Amino acid sequence: MLNAQAIASAPGARRLFVLSLVARLPLTMLSIALLLHAQHLTGSFAVAGLVAGAYAVSVGAGGPVLGQLVDRRGQTSTLVFSSFASAALLAGIAWLPVGVPFGVLAGMAAAIGLATPPLGACLRTLLPGLLSDAGALRAAYAVDASASELTWVAGPPLALGLGALISTGAALLFAAATLLAATAAFAAQPASRAWRPERAGGLARGGSLRSPAMRTLVIVFVAVGALFGAVEVAIAAAADNLGSAAAAGPLLGVWGAGSLAGGLVAVRLGGGAHRAGGLAVVLAGLTAGHLLLVPAAGSILALGAVLAVAGAAIAPTYATVYAMVEQAAPSGTATEAFAWLATAVAVGAAAGAAIGGALADGAGPATAFALAGGAGAIALLATTLRSSTLGASAAPGYV
């Protein structure tokens, strides 16, 4: 409770959290909104899938680049420029006519992804300066991981609702306006404007990935992302096999609610694990919980119950890894480091969804759930085998 009070009383911390979440809400809308808009313009879900894929790949590629730019030049100019560029591109693609060539759609979607502001990374970079107490800082990372679930719960349904009630273009215009306004408001906050990157010598090449600890965390998050991607596909396949395809949405919501609950517990317990051994324990829980989905795949009710339990380890996993970045990332690379973690999850999720989809089609959804458990086991194994890297300080130039 004291940690939560410390977070709430920190100058500007509450406002930064709120603005960051509002700015990240439209980002959770874009994958489905771009997919639906591209399908409307081309009449093809196959083409629409490629357009959405171009966006997803470019988000992963652009995040570390923009994060590195923040670390070199500060938050204000990078956030303002990137939010304006992405909002302008979203408005442009929203007004494209029916029958537009695939190349134009894919190119604009990729440009939107490359310009997506690294809001989450910027917020997490600011937190150590706002919260001097280590316990409060760990709790803040847990709060962020938990609150992020709310954007994923609200964003996709909001995109679908606007698309159905008004138009797919209107959904993109809403996302553009919200992203621009909230990001500008975040960048105008004193803590964001005053933040200056640390100047460290010897880091011209390699950036945050010069650190073995950061490489370990990236490997872990690629595997965790694969778990997420496999579970999302497996849930949809299981619901369809059981004759209740519409249950997929509520089941995903239960999974997210479990994560939110786990994050709130982590906040009360001090923000999650503190060391490599603690991360291994959290990952063991993540793995075990998702392996239990294999025998539950034959029942909607059983899936819902197990998803609530399995999801409880998600936010604590994020919170624990986020809390390790301050020591893992070389001086002056924190924003880039957080952006690499987001990229790692995106890459892993894409791979997990692709492999999980093939397994679900060929051998049933239980095999895709087994893949998710296997991905969790890989994350646990990487943490165990490379635990020594997570106990070391990542000083400038540390290799």
Image (cartoon, rainbow, N blue to C red):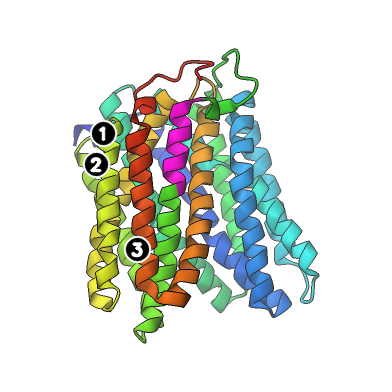
Discs 3, 1 touching: Cβ within 8 Å: no
Circle 2 SS class: helix
- Residue neighbourhood size for the residue with mark 2, other residues' Cα within 10 Å, grouped as few (<14), some (14–19), many (≥20): some
| Horizontal side of residue 294 vs 37, given as left or right | left
Circle 3 SS class: helix
What amino acid type is highlighted by mark number 3? Ala
Q: Which residue is mark 2?
A: 281
Q: Position of residue 261 (x, y in %)?
A: 25, 53
Question: Residue at 46% across / 66% down in the picture?
Answer: 356
Closest to the observer, 222 or 315: 222
Circle 1 SS class: helix
What amino acid type is highlighted by mark number 1? Gly
Closest to the observer, 71 or 17: 71
Q: Position of residue 92 (x, y in %)?
A: 74, 60
Closest to the observer, 57 or 95: 57
Asked where in the image residue 205 lies, by quadrant, the reply is top right
Q: Which residue is mark 3?
A: 370
Discs 2, 1 touching: Cβ within 8 Å: yes
Q: Is residue 388 visible?
A: yes
3 or 1: mark nearer the eye: 3
Q: Which residue is mark 1?
A: 277
Instruction: Work out which residue is located at the far top of the displayed protein and give it.
Output: 201
Magenta extent: 211-222
Q: Position of residue 300 (x, y in %)?
A: 28, 77
Discs 3, 2 touching: Cβ within 8 Å: no
Quadrant the N terminus occupies: top left
Question: Residue at 24% across / 41% down in the picture?
Answer: 281
